[in-house]
Structure formats: C-alpha cells, structure tokens
Image (cartoon, rainbow, N blue to C red):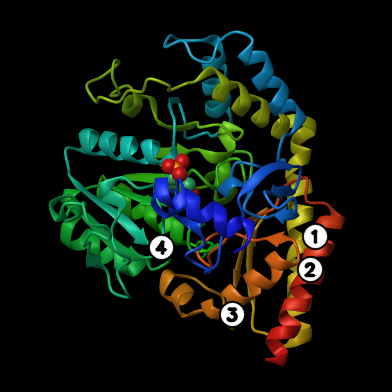
C-alpha cells in the first residue's frame, strides 16, 4: 500500500468515499487520488512530497494559479478585521458594483456561497417571476446538486426527466425537461408542447461539465429567441465561464443577453463565493426587496469578498492583460497536444475556449453528451494515469474541463506536452 492508499483508507472510514466531493475520489479514472499538502503557482504538492502540474485548478477558481499575491494579501487584510459579521459591508457593495459593471445583463446581484445555491435561487426567482413551474435543462450541463437539476441526461431525444440520484423525488424532477445540448430543434419541440408552463431554460453557454463543448453557431441566439417568444426566462449558468473565458463571461463573448446569470468559481478567488443576478425588476423580487425568500449566514463573507474582488481587479488590470496570457498559455497547450496526437496518429479533439480545455479521444468534434459518452474514455483513463506518473495532474474524469492559469508557463506546458507525447507513444505501441 502506498501512502496515498493508506490515506484514502483512513479517509474512507469517516468520509463517504474518503472525499468531500465525488469527482475527487478518482472513480472516473480508477486508482487512488493524490492527497494534497499544498500548492504554489501551477503546481500541486502531494502528501508524498511530489509536485504535479495542476490542471484541476480546484475545478475553476484559479485563473492565476495557486496563491496569487494580490489575493493572499487581500485575504490577510480582511482577516485583520473579522471573519464574518452578519451585517452589510462596503466591500460587498464594491464587489456587486464590479460584477454589474462587467456584465451588461446585470443590474443587481445577490451574493451566495456556492454555485449550487446560485442556480437553485435563480430557478426559484424564475418560477416566482413567471408563475410557472417547469424548467428546461440540457443534457450534460451541470448546475450544481439541487434537486431540480439532478436529472439523467436524456439519450438522444428530448425527454421528461427522471431523477439521477436516489432521494430526489420524481415529483420534483418531473418539472424538469431535458434536451440534448446544441440541438435547437429538440428545445423547440419542448416549447411547442409545454411553452406556457416553462419558467426558464438554464444552460452553460459553453458547456464545461462534459469536457468542453462550445455552442454551435446560432445555438445561444436561438435559445434567446425561443425563450423570449414563450415568455420564459433564459438563465446563463456562468459559474464556470464567468470571468474565465472573458471579462464579462461567455455572454459578452457571444453577445447574447440572458435574463438571469449565475456566477461562482473565479469570482470567489478560491474562497466560497457565488452570485446570481439580472435585471432590476427581476432581482427586486428577492427578499427583503420582494417576496422571494433566499438567505445565508455566511453570504457575502468578508474573506471571500476580499479574495474575489482582488482576483477580479487583477484580471481587469493592464487592460485585461491576464486574458491574453491565459489565451497564449491555452493555445500553447492545445498546439502541443495536437502535435503529439498527429505524430502518433491518435484521434484527439482539443476543444478550447481560452484557458478552458476539453480533451476527447474521438475522431470528430464533440457537440453533445452522447458524443462524449462515445469517445474513448478507456484511453483517457490510461493516459490520465501515465501523465500522473509523469507529474501532470489532469482532472480525474473525461467529463471535466482542464484549466490553464497565467502561472502555466512554457516550462509547465512543455513538460505536459512531453509527458502527453510519451503517453500517446505507449498508446500507439499497444
Ligand atoms: C461548478 C458549477 C456549479 C456548481 O457550483 P458549486 O460551487 O460546486 O456548487 C454550477 N454550475 C456550473 C456551470 C458549474 O461549473
């Protein structure tokens, strides 16, 4: 037994699967997760003392890698006051102003603690504002673990949801309608049959929870037009894409304006912080301005607000120079991976938007969940473990995006590409 196996056994006695969140347990790739002792820049440091180039990035927050100085200092300054007050602060007003200035669709926001809270609250608001109950979600999009979103991905045809977890009442998910991603006709059929019962359609404008699957040209515009025609709200879940793919998120990149937006990950600077927001007349329905109840003991937590604000200001600095670095680092990784795949004649799709990277062992571009399922996931597992042995830590599942940061320089990326090349050489030889 290795040290990590011992740790997993010990953890599993007191924590389900030994982890605080399922993907971390490596069930998607098999084997034993790396218990992490610390991190710096683009590197994780394992409890075995080894360093790994980190493409997990805590699943999204770390645009600058670990421990960026501006964020650490902001947390230290906030810590000198208190960890939490349960009272309004100027700092949270400043963060709200920053979010509203960055995303044109936001007049007002509510700060919460997790992406899950943001999406469930946005849905509650959409249901209250429309007086309707149903919600449309797209197969392969993840919106946190609230009951209405835990619906099995419909295979192929649009279908009424069945719960994908025990403990979720069918009565709850019966209100959730599912259509395949990037299939506008399927969504049109749902609206044709249920249009006047649908409160909202929620979508990841760039899907990042089935690898990375970008919207086909016209898809987001089509969803916008369809929801508007049926007076349903369009919710962009930008918990992953917000401030990562661009200042202003995917909605700015594609110039499509949703009614409600959810944010998280990057805006918390690595601390628990998320938000939902939209037009004034919608957001003023939230308590105490309006009747839609939503609250939180630690919401707007001063440490998280300080970390998030510092991270966003650093992203905005020098005319958004960080985004050019993220793009350059992402492009360098993409080119290296493509070159290795071509050299070894291994079919590979690298689907990238800036610093969000999807890797699929498939011979055609992947546009929906069914195509992800059909990719060579066994090869992904083998390559994952070869890379890990070479000191490169990918997200442990073919359904997760890789995250590049500004700290992923030539050294880290070239090491990654060399390790990937060796892994594909072994695949080609097998
Ligand atoms: C991560 C994520 C969530 C859930 O956020 P948590 O903070 O993990 O609750 C929701 N939506 C999207 C698009 C995400 O990527």
What's the CA distance linking mark 2 and mark 4? Answer: 28 Å
Q: Are marks 1 and 3 in contact (CB under 8 Å)?
A: no
What's the CA distance linking mark 3 and mark 2? Answer: 17 Å
Judging depth in this view, the residue of 49 and 235 nearest the camera is: 49
What's the CA distance linking mark 4 and mark 1? Answer: 28 Å
Res. 50 image quadrant:
bottom right
Is residue 392 depicted above or below 321 in this figure? below
Tag 3, which secondary structure? helix
Judging depth in this view, the residue of 72 and 49 nearest the camera is: 49
Tag 4, which secondary structure? loop
Q: Are marks 4 and 1 in contact (CB under 8 Å)?
A: no
Q: Disc 3, ligand 1: is the CB inside 8 Å?
A: no
- Residue for badge 2: 417
Query: Which disc, if any, is residue 140?
Result: 4
Q: Are marks 1 and 2 in contact (CB under 8 Å)?
A: yes
Tag 1, which secondary structure? helix
What's the CA distance linking mark 4 and mark 3? Answer: 21 Å
Residue 278 left/right relative to 310: left
- Residue for badge 3: 379
Q: Nearer the viewer, mark 4 or mark 1?
A: 1
Q: Residue 125: give x, y in percent of width and height.
A: 28, 33
Q: Residue 323: give x, y in percent of width and height.
A: 73, 44
Mark 3: give few (<14), some (14-19) or many (20+) Cα within 10 Å.
Answer: some
Q: Residue 92: give x, y in percent of width and height.
A: 52, 17
Res. 82 image quadrant:
top right
Q: Disc 2, ligand 1: is the CB inside 8 Å?
A: no
Residue 361 left/right relative to 186: right
Residue 304 left/right relative to 173: right
Q: Can the viewer see residue 206 in this picture?
A: no
What's the CA distance linking mark 1 and mark 3? Answer: 21 Å
Q: Earlier in the sequence, mark 4 or mark 3?
A: 4
């Amino acid at each position: 037994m290795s040290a990590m196996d011992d740790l997993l056994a010990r953890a599993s006695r007191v924590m389900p699967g030994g982890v605080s969140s399922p993907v971390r347990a490596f069930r998607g790739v098999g084997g034993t997760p790396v218990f992490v002792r610390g991190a710096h820049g683009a590197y994780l440091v394992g409890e075995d003392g080894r360093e790994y180039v980190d493409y997990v990035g805590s699943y999204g927050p770390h645009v600058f890698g670990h421990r960026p100085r501006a964020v650490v200092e902001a947390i230290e300054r906030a810590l000198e006051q208190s960890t939490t007050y349960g009272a309004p602060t100027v700092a949270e007003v400043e963060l709200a102003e920053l979010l509203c200035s960055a995303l044109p669709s936001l007049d007002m926001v509510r700060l919460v603690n997790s992406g899950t809270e943001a999406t469930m609250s946005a849905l509650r608001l959409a249901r209250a504002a429309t007086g309707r109950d149903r919600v449309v979600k797209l197969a392969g999009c993840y919106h946190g673990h609230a009951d209405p979103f835990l619906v099995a991905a419909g295979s192929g045809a649009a279908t009424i949801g069945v719960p994908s977890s025990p403990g979720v009442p069918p009565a709850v998910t019966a209100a959730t309608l599912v259509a395949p991603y990037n299939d506008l006709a399927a969504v049109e059929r749902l609206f044709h049959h249920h249009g006047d019962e649908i409160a909202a359609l929620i979508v990841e404008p760039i899907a990042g929870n089935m690898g990375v699957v970008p919207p086909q040209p016209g898809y987001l515009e089509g969803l916008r037009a369809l929801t508007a025609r049926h007076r349903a709200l369009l919710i962009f879940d930008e918990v992953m894409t917000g401030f990562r793919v661009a200042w202003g998120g995917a909605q700015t990149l594609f110039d499509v304006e949703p009614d409600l937006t959810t944010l998280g990950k990057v805006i918390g600077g690595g601390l628990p912080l998320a938000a939902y927001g939209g037009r004034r007349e919608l957001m003023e329905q939230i308590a105490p301005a309006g009747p839609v109840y939503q609250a939180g003991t630690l919401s707007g937590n001063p440490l998280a607000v300080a970390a998030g604000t510092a991270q966003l200001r650093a992203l905005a600095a020098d005319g958004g120079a960080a985004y050019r670095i993220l793009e350059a680092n992402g492009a360098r990784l993409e080119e290296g991976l493509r070159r290795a795949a071509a050299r070894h004649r291994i079919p590979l799709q690298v689907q990238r938007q800036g610093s969000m990277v999807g890797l699929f062992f498939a011979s055609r571009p992947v546009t929906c969940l069914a195509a992800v399922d059909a990719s060579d996931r066994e090869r992904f597992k083998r390559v994952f473990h070869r890379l890990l042995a070479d000191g490169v830590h990918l997200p442990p599942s073919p359904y997760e995006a890789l995250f590049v940061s500004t700290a992923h320089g030539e050294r880290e990326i070239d090491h990654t590409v060399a390790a990937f090349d060796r892994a594909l050489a072994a695949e080609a030889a097998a």
